[in-house]
Image (cartoon, rainbow, N blue to C red):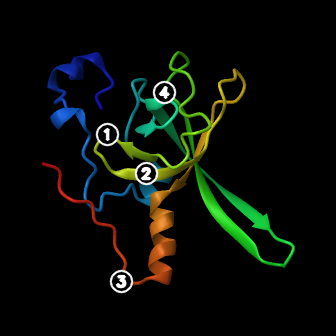
Amino acid sequence: MYLKPKDWTTLGYPFERHLPLQALGVIEEDELRCPKMLNADGERCPIVIKNGLTTGVRLGRATGIESFVREYFQDGTQSTSIEWAILPYDHKSGVFSTPGDSGAIIVDGKGCIGGLLIGGADETKYIDITYATPFYWILQRIQAQFPNAYVHLPPMA
């Protein structure tokens, strides 16, 4: 994704209008926390994209901020997850997601998977944050239980 108008002439439109996901392409933890991608204002802020059921295709700004979410159950067990905050692309674009978009994959402009959308804001003027579980973290949990598991995305035609 080219964010500055001077770069638009080099933009190659994806084959059949689909952005191919990169086989085993996952945005790693260090890139999520300390992004290298710059937005149009020169700030470190990866631009991400998703195609949700209710809002369709939307661009957003990944914050690099992760938060821990813990749930405690009556039987004494607990569950911990990490969530990644995504903001709207700009003040005119509207929220990145709304209820019904959960489960959408969030990717960067190279087609690398960043996260799985788990919660979004409704169309309000005060709440505009979407939360995603980072995909690197999901893979770590899967591989801890199933050491021989791997993610394979078939090559795009």
Q: Secondary structure at mark 1?
A: loop
Q: CA distance from mark 2 to mark 1?
A: 11 Å
Residue at point 44% right, 82% down? 146
Classify mark 3: helix, strand or loop.
Answer: loop
Asked whether, in this view, residue 3 is left or right of residue 82, the answer is left
Location of mark 1 (residue): 109
| C-alpha gap between disc 4 and disc 1 | 13 Å
Q: Which residue is mark 3?
A: 148
Q: Amino acid at mark 3?
A: Asn
**If you read the primary sequence from the N terminus, does the residue marked by circle 4 or circle 1 appear first?**
4
Location of mark 2 (residue): 114
Q: Is residue 115 left or right of residue 153?
A: right
The amino acid pointed to by label 1 is Gly
Label 3, label 4: how far apart the Cα atoms are: 38 Å
* Dot placed on the residue nearer the N-terminal end, 3 or 2: 2
Q: Quadrant of residue 58?
A: top left
| Residue at position x 41%, y 84% in the image | 147
- Evaluate if marks 3 and 1 touch, with contact meaning CB atoms under 8 Å apart: no
At label 2, counting other C-alpha atoms closer than 10 Å, the crowd grade (few under 14, some 14-19, many 20 or more) is many
According to the image, label 4 marks what residue?
A: 89
Kind of residue indicated by mark 4? Tyr
| SS class, disc 4 | loop
Does residue 118 sit above or below 70 in this rendering?
above
Side of 107 relative to 100 (left or right): left
Which label lies toward us, 3 or 4? 3
